[in-house]
Amino acid sequence: MTEMNRQILLNRRPEGMPVEEDFKLVETELPELKDGEFLAKTIYLSVDPYMRGRMNDRKSYSEPFKLDEVIGGGTVSRVVQSKNPKFKEGDITVGMLGWQEYAISDGKGVRNGVPKGIPMSACLGVLGMPGMTGYFGLLDIAEPKDGETVVVSGAAGAVGSLVGQIAKIKGCRVIGTAGSDEKVNHIVNDLGFDAGLNYKTSQNYYKDLKELCPDGIDVYFDNVGGPMTDAAIALINTHARISICGQIALYNSEKAEEGPRFLWKLIEKQAKIEGFLVFQFVKKYKQAYQDLTQWVKEGKIQYRENITEGIENTPKAFIGMFHGENTGKQIVKVSEE
Ligand SMILES: NC(=O)c1ccc[n+]([C@@H]2O[C@H](COP(=O)([O-])OP(=O)(O)OC[C@H]3O[C@@H](n4cnc5c(N)ncnc54)[C@H](OP(=O)(O)O)[C@@H]3O)[C@@H](O)[C@H]2O)c1
């Protein structure tokens, strides 16, 4: 009997906020394996905000997704059939095998094995790309010091929740911004942030942040961009560091945004602003992986995953991130562990 595969393809390029019609679910026959290949069944797949950029027909740091092709993205999968000696049936792998139930791979870019004692889904979150992003974006770009004030936007998400907790480990006072009272309670009461701001109910970001940061801001870790970033930069201290990780508030904008012209503030405060891509740190991932694994095992870092069930619900889970439906890392569970 021929095995069937279910895959999510890019149906059309989203205009503004993505909608379900931008994607389509198709059933295809799985081809025979060739020598050197293995068949992997997806257990978990990752939906990430950066994918929105790849849905546009614009060249950026990675190629745009092609129409009618499977959307690429991080996966944790089980090998179910193999003609590759390095991958045996039953092995659990971590790779970029995309939004599909099954994938055929020659093993390139696929890691065999997941850490023991930590759920395998963490390889897409705290021990995966978002984990590396938070670790290096904070420690290497912003270099937080004991006693400093750190503000993190998008604080209840995969990257932001981790950044705040690492900053606490480094002895900082940490304030997070997030889109609901539940999220603010979560970052303060579960994750140990010192305070939080619900940006959806705040009438004045500058005034509210100023109250929460009476000594000003030494480090601003930006996941969001837009008016929150304008407010944070207006409050920076001398020699502040601003780490530009993401600009999710702008990903669905159809026209170029204008904001306050804040560069004078960087001069006045002799501050540094730097954007980064997680991949620039690839040679140092091992160190981050070791530290994060240890902190998770010691309970110094808590992480939450927002798990949506079923490959067919992948577009919904992806779109949900732009409406703040996730707390922690958004993952889709495609099959049982
Ligand atoms: N530079 C890099 O290499 C790199 C790598 C990975 C991720 N990133 C970036 O890091 C950021 C966080 O990524 P993540 O994977 O951790 O996602 P995430 O924070 O887990 O999920 C996205 C969150 O963004 C918030 N959001 C959505 N629309 C918003 C808006 N218009 N204004 C303010 N907040 C909004 C939502 O929370 P609320 O309820 O709080 O609105 C949502 O839950 C993204 O900007 C992403 O592109 C960068």
Image (tube, rainbow, N blue to C red):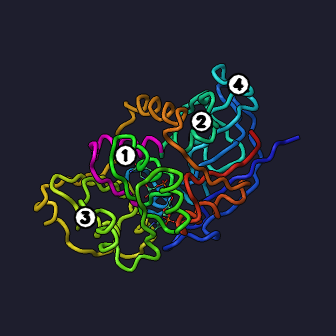
Name the amino acid, label 4. Lys
Question: Label 3 near label 4: C-beta < 8 Å?
Answer: no
Q: Which residue was labeled with disc 2?
A: 94
> Which-is-in-front pick, marks 2 and 4?
2
Q: CA distance from mark 1 to mark 2?
A: 28 Å
Q: CA distance from mark 4 to mark 3?
A: 55 Å
Task: Report the front residue among 147 and 116.
Answer: 147
Q: Which residue was labeled with disc 4?
A: 83
Considering only order in the chain, which callout, 2 or 1, is on the residue closer to the N terminus?
2
Residue at the location (43% across, 46% down)? 165
Point out residue 278 in the picture as x, y percentages from the top left corner: 39, 44
Considering only order in the chain, which callout, 3 or 4, is on the residue closer to the N terminus?
4
Is residue 106 visible in the rendered image? The answer is: yes
> Which-is-in-front pick, marks 1 and 3?
1
Residue at the location (34% across, 54% down)? 221
Tell me the SS state at disc 3.
helix
> Which-is-in-front pick, marks 1 and 2?
1
Task: Report the front residue among 253 and 171.
Answer: 171
Instruction: Check residue 233 in the rendering and tell me which mark sits there, or answer none.
Output: 3
Q: Is residue 146 magenta?
A: yes
Report crowding for label 1: few under 14, some 14 to 19, many 20 or more residues within 10 A (C-alpha). Answer: many
Q: Is residue 213 magenta?
A: no
Residue at the bottom extreme of this rendering: 203
Name the amino acid, label 2. Val
Please give the range of residues in magenta.
131-153
Considering only order in the chain, which callout, 3 or 1, is on the residue closer to the N terminus?
1
Q: CA distance from mark 4 to mark 1?
A: 46 Å
89 displayed left or right of 156: right
